[in-house]
Image (cartoon, rainbow, N blue to C red):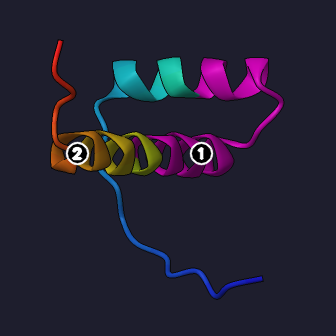
């Protein structure tokens, strides 16, 4: 497993409650849920960058 670096994340209480509930629904820890969401966002960003680099097909 890759080494992980700890850091402080400040989140407003309402968002934290929603993330905790979402994590419970997905059977993840809060940390695991945040890591999953960040990973998915990075994958999505890479896909959108790849789409932007492709020449558009003619109609």
Task: State whether the magenta stretch is mostly helix, strand or loop.
Answer: helix
Location of residue 14 in the rendering, given as x and y in whole percent from the top left corner: 36, 18
Which residue is at the far top? 59
On the rendered image, what quadrant is the C terminus found in?
top left
Q: In this view, does 27 lie to the left or right of 36?
A: right
User: What residue did someone put label 2 on?
Assistant: 54
Q: Which of marks 2 and 1 is in front?
A: 2
Location of residue 47 in the rendering, given as x and y in whole percent from the top left corner: 38, 43
At 46% from the left and 48% from the top, the residue drawn is: 43
Location of residue 36 in the rendering, given as x and y in whole percent from the top left corner: 59, 45
Q: In this view, does 10 lie to the left or right of 24?
A: left
Which residue is at the far right? 27
User: What residue did someone put label 1 on?
Assistant: 36
Whether label 2 touches label 1, CB < 8 Å: no
Q: Is mark 1 on a helix, strand or loop?
A: helix
At 77% from the left and 25% from the top, the residue drawn is: 26
Confirm whether the magenta stretch covers residue 29: yes
At 51% from the left and 51% from the top, the residue drawn is: 39
At 16% from the left and 42% from the top, the residue drawn is: 55
Q: In this view, does 31 lie to the left or right of 27?
A: left
Magenta region: which residues?
Answer: 20-41
């Amino acid at each position: 497993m890759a080494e992980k670096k700890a850091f402080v994340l400040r989140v407003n209480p309402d968002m934290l409650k929603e993330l905790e509930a979402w994590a419970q629904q997905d059977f993840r820890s809060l940390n695991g849920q945040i890591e999953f969401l960040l990973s998915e966002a990075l994958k999505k960003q890479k896909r959108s960058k790849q789409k932007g680099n492709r020449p558009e097909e003619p109609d």
